[in-house]
Image: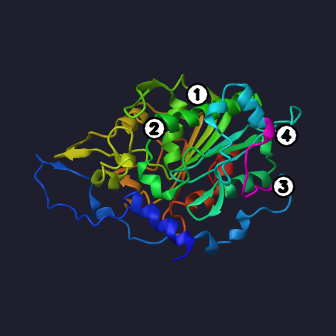
Amino acid sequence: MPANAKIFTVLLLVLGLFFACEPAEKETPQQQTGPDLSTAIEEWEEEAMTNYDVSRLQPKGDEEKSVPAGSVITTHFQSWLSANGYGAYDFARTDIYGGSYGGKTSNSTPVNRQPVIFIHGNSDKAVGTQFGQSGWTESLNYFLDQGYTQAELYAFTWGDADASSAANNYHSKEFVMHVRKFIEAVLAYTGASKVDVVSHSMGVTLSRKAVKGGWAYDPNDGGSYNVGSSLTSSVDAFVGIAGGNQGLVNCYYSSSVPTCDDVNGFYPGYMWGWYGPYGVSDYIDDLNSSAAYEGSYRYSIWSTADQIVGYGCLVYGVNTCRLPSQTGQKAYGSAPYGHFNLKDLTTAVQYQMVVKHTVI
């Protein structure tokens, strides 16, 4: 089996995306019920990068206008991070090939455009060329082609970039605070009054909390903690791609998996008769307890053909891929716009949302 196919298969298995579970017989209104599985989309295998011009993900020769496969934030940015109290977060991630991107080359490097921060999804990384772990290579290269510079584009890896451990990743204190501190660092480092945030998959829900701020709880890491004050006024455009903002249907059937638990996972809750959902993940419930805090402009990019989120993006009849109180959206309804291609094939859409505040 090709390496790309192996990674795709592992991701599906560990996230519990295709279950052998059959829906239970129809229950009375007094009984607890889970999501309706009758809206399940037909299972399909998303096309790998090799089927849609993988050359676009390779360095182009001119390093000023391309993203090296083994990218790492600049030495200047690394030095600044160490000198300003961010060293412990290890944003460079030199332990991962393509672990980070962005930064100035010297104090005199100009930052003329509003910085854009890219936050990847579960088991992905900052920069890559492999299906399921392509990172933000496509987006970074597109923004560079439109005139952005390395000093205006930023990405880091918040996890271990290992698909085999994806099911163990949840909205932990570690991940939330790494995203939060990276946003704070870019704001301070560039001197910008605002940044744009583009996020994918689990990166959407991590970024939403990082921006919202306030209290959170991680029973595996000291209990309650304070993320900090809201960053709403510091975010211009927020783009959420293929997020699980209302939880994930399949997590109802695998709530014992950390990614799906009812504290910091994607557990969607249950219905009691015609009422509910009840018992939604505390983390998801907190994200949706208020709205319109992600930034001045809030966009989502999603697809009913997303085979990872599944079920046409619906959770108890509500679209989980959309941001509550969003400004606009770009929706797709067929292949090749699956979970990963939604990120890699919508670079122009992302750019228009960030720069023009429009949807094409």
Residue 40 position, x and y percent, is 34, 64
Q: Which of the two labelled residues, at mark 3 and mark 4, occupies the earlier sequence position?
A: 3
For label 3, the SS is helix
Which sits in the foreground, 262 or 139?
262
Look at the picture and state if 92 lies above or below 190: below
The reply, left or right, for residue 32 in relation to residue 287 is left
Q: Which residue is mark 3?
A: 63
Q: Which residue is mark 2?
A: 172
Q: Which mark is residue 231?
A: 1
Look at the picture and state if 57 lies above or below 183: below
Residue 103 seen from this side: yes
Residue 348 seen from this side: no
For marks 3 and 2, give the CA distance: 35 Å
For label 4, the SS is loop
Q: Amino acid at mark 2?
A: Ser
Q: Amino acid at mark 3?
A: Glu
The reply, left or right, for residue 66 in relation to residue 339 is right
Q: Which of the two labelled residues, at mark 2 and mark 1, occupies the earlier sequence position?
A: 2
Q: Which of the two labelled residues, at mark 2 and mark 4, occupies the earlier sequence position?
A: 4
Q: Which mark is residue 105?
A: 4
Q: Tell whether label 4 touches label 3 (CB within 8 Å).
A: no
Q: Is residue 4 magenta?
A: no
Q: Which residues are magenta?
A: 65-76
Examine the image and state in which quarter residue 80 appears: top right
For label 2, the SS is loop
